[in-house]
Image: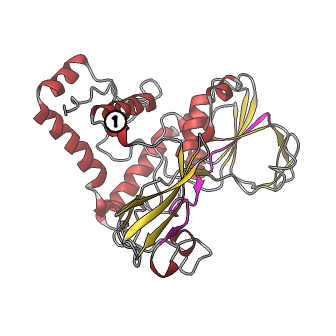
Amino acid sequence: MTFAPHPRWSEYYSTGWEIREYYERLVKQYEVDEHLRLKHQVLSAKWSDLIHQWEVTIKDLVTGDIFTDTSHFLVEAAGRLNIPSFPNIPGLDTEYRGVLAHTSQWTEDLTRSLEGKRIAVIGNGASGQQFLVNTLDKVAHVDHYVRSRQWIVPTFSPNFVPATLDVLGAHVYTEEEKERFERDPSAYLEYRKSIEHNLHGRFEGSILRSEANDKAWELYRKALWDRVGGDQFWFERLVPDFAPGCKRPTPSAGYVEAIRSPKVDYVDDSRIVNATASGLVTEDGRERKVDIIVAATGFKKGFLPLFPTVGRNRLDLSTYWATDGPIGYPKTYFGIMAPNVPNYFAVVQVS
C-alpha cells in the first residue's frame, strides 16, 4: 500500500468539490472502496447475547433484497445532518403552490431557476447566511425571515484568516507555498497543528464571564460594529444579548452587507403565522408573495440512531434517547459508548 501525498489545497477554506475529491482519492488509495457497500440501507441492529455479536438487517436498495450481517462491533457514524427539518408553518405543505426546497437538497437546476425570482429564505444560521449571499445577485428580491440573532463573526477563531466577498477561500495558496508543504512534511504538519490549536485549543473562551469569554464578547461586538459601518440601528438589530459560545458563531463573508441591500426585506420583527398559495403571512397580517421558499432550518433527529438499535434488555436507543423517550437525550460515555449496549460505538458528541 502506498501513502497519499500531502494534499495540495488551493485555498485556506477549501471548496466542497475539492474536499470531496480528496476523500474519493483517499478511499481508492487506501483500498477502502473494496469494503464499501453503497446504496444499502440499515433497517435495524440488534445485539445478540447468544452469539455475542450484532445482527444487522440490511436492504440492498438496487435489488430490494433484505439480508442479515453479523459483527463483533457496531460503529454508528451516520452523521447528524441527514433528515431535513422543515418549519412547522400551517399551510406550507397544503396551501403553498410555489417551489419549496431545503438548503440541504439544493440542486443546480434550482440555482438556474432563481434568475429574476422573488424568494423567501427562512433561517439565519450558517446555511441561511451563505445561501443568501451566494444567490442575491441572481434573484429579484429576498424576504429573509429571522427568528433569533446570531453572533456574526469574521472567523471561528481570531487567529484564522477571514474570508471576504472577493476571496471566499480567504487565501489562495501560491505554488511556492504548496511546493514547500510538499517538500517539507514537517512544515506542513506544523501548519496543520497551528490551525487545529486555534480551533480546538480555546476551551477557556466558552466559560461565561471568564477573561477569554469577555474578550471574545468585546471582539465580536467590535467586528459587528465595523461591519455595519457604525450604524447604530443595524448594530442594535443584529447584536445578540447572549455570550459568545452559547451558540455556534456564524462567519459568513458578505452577509451583513447583503441583508442591508435594497433587494432584501429583513423580517425579524414579525413571525410567520401561515402560508398561502403564493407566499407567507406574518403576525402583522402582511402577506409577502414569493416564487420560491427556501428552508435553511437545520435537521432533525441528529443525535439519534436512524434505525432501531437494540442492546441488552431490549433497550432501543432510537426510542430510549428520543425527545419523548424515558430520558429524552443521548446518555453516553464521552459521547462514544452507551450503557447496556455492548460493543457499540457512536459519534454523538454529548455525554
Q: How many marks?
A: 1
For the C terminus, the quadrant is bottom left
Q: Is residue 257 magenta?
A: no
Amino acid residing under circle 1? Val
Q: Is residue 14 left or right of residue 282?
A: left
Q: Which residue is mark 1?
A: 27
Residue at horizontal 55 percent and vertical 68 percent from the top: 318
Residue 41 location (% of width, % of height): 55, 50
Local packing at callout 1 (Cα closer than 10 Å; few below 14, some 14-19, many 20+) is: some
Along the line of sight, the residue nearer the viewer: 306 or 290: 306
Q: Main secondary structure of the magenta part?
A: loop
Residue sitting nearer the eye, 217 or 231: 217
Q: Position of residue 185 (x, y in %)?
A: 13, 32
Tell me the quarter of the picture where residue 212 sits. bottom left
- 26, 347: nearer the viewer: 26
What is the secondary structure assignment of the residue under circle 1? helix
**Relative side of 348 to 97, left or right:** left
Q: Quadrant of residue 284?
A: bottom right
Coloring basis for residues: secondary structure
Residue in the image at 25% along x and 55% along y: 201
* Residue located 55% across and 48% down the image: 125
Q: Is residue 328 above or below residue 86?
A: below
* Quarter of the picture holding the N terminus: top left
Nearer to us in this view, 91 or 289: 91
Q: Position of residue 95 (x, y in %)?
A: 87, 47
Per the rendered image, the range of residues in magenta is 290-310
User: Does the magenta portion include 308?
Assistant: yes
Q: Where residue 296 sits: x, y (%)?
A: 62, 46
